[in-house]
Amino acid sequence: MNINQPIHPDILRRLDAEYVAFHYRHLQYIFPCEKEPWSPSSRPRLSRIVLGGMKSVKVGSVQDKDVGNFQARPMLSWFHGGGWVLGGLGNENAVLRHICNYIRCVVITINCRHAPGHPYLAAINDVVVAKDLSTYSCRISISGLSAGASLAAILSIKIAHLGLTPGPVFQLLLSHVIDNTATTAGIWSSAQHAPWLTPSRTTWYWDMYLPKPSSASNCDAPKTFTRTGECDTLAPEALQYTQYLRSAGVETKIEIYNGLRVVNYDP
């Protein structure tokens, strides 16, 4: 088999041995998605997912909700990873089932419109509409992975700026992507050889998602916990965003996992 995604020697010594073994066994043979023509067939179809043995929740677009009387339970809204382009509603089911069982909360996964067919601002508009789901619970956490975590962070800020209630009590951001101006000559310099989610792949996602660069300077987010891997391409962004939140007076905690790349649960 052809080795399509080798690990660069400069980062090999920093990676966790268990991850290296897994990468060599599986990931190195996968052809990089950014080198193939884009096809929407990579996205899974809508599905019904039972989380943690609790009442099933029909997931799909934010209009496809089939929820019961769960006002007494806290709720976690989840936005999946995939660079605003790939992935779908079944991406992170393993960890969501664990969260549902461990915390005894209701978990709702939300699927936004994807780029390149629906570039920025489509997904952001969708997550604002998804805010309506929070009316089913007075204790809501907004969360996501990678690009989904980016949407979660944006939604948290928009809720505050628009004065919407009830607001989230917590946001959970896993390997979140924030800076669309990042390059290997700048913030990505320490992770320029990161495996799997490489700088070139991350740039490919941005190019599919953004019609033009955009930025924002205001911040009014809830208290935040974020985690990332030491060898993750996005780790410097997580650190930078944590510093930004703290400088804005937001109670923030970050955990960095030494020797790991993307903090994910389903490779």
Image (cartoon, grey):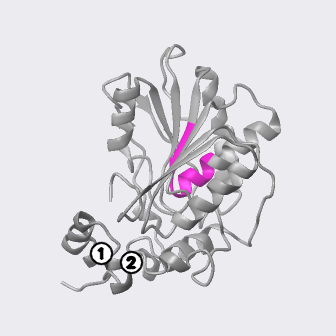
Viewer-proximal residue, 217 or 56?
217
Q: Residue at x 49, y 18 (%)?
A: 73
Task: Kindly identify the amino acid type of the residue bearing the numbered disc 1.
Answer: Ile
Q: Does residue 176 sit above or below 186 in this rendering?
A: above
Please state if 125 lies on the left or on the right of 2 as rendered: right
Q: Does residue 254 sit above or below 212 in this rendering?
A: above
- Tag 1 secondary structure: loop
- Residue to which mark 2 is pinned: 32
Q: Residue at x 20, y 69 (%)?
A: 21
* Quadrant assignment, res 5: bottom left
* Quadrant assignment, res 186: bottom right
Q: Residue at x 65, y 63 (%)?
A: 119
Q: Residues within 10 Å of mark 2 (few under 14, many from 20)?
A: some
Q: Position of residue 90 (x, y in %)?
A: 38, 47
Q: Does residue 55 sit above or below 158 in this rendering?
A: above
User: Quarter holding the C terminus?
Assistant: bottom left
Please tell me the numbered disc located at residue 30. 1
How far is the residue under mark 1 from the one under mark 2?
Answer: 6 Å
- 25 magenta-colored: no
Viewer-proximal residue, 122 or 186?
186
- Tag 2 secondary structure: loop
Mark 1 and 2 residues: CB-CB less than 8 Å, in contact? yes
Q: Position of residue 226 (x, y in %)?
A: 53, 49
Q: Residues within 10 Å of mark 1 (few under 14, many from 20)?
A: some
Task: Kindly identify the amino acid type of the residue bearing the numbered disc 2.
Answer: Pro
User: Quarter holding the N terminus?
Assistant: bottom left
Q: Is residue 172 visible?
A: yes
Q: Position of residue 34 (x, y in %)?
A: 46, 78
Viewer-proximal residue, 173 or 159?
173
* Quadrant assignment, res 224: top right
- Residue range highlighted in magenta: 142-152
Please tell me the numbered disc located at residue 115. none
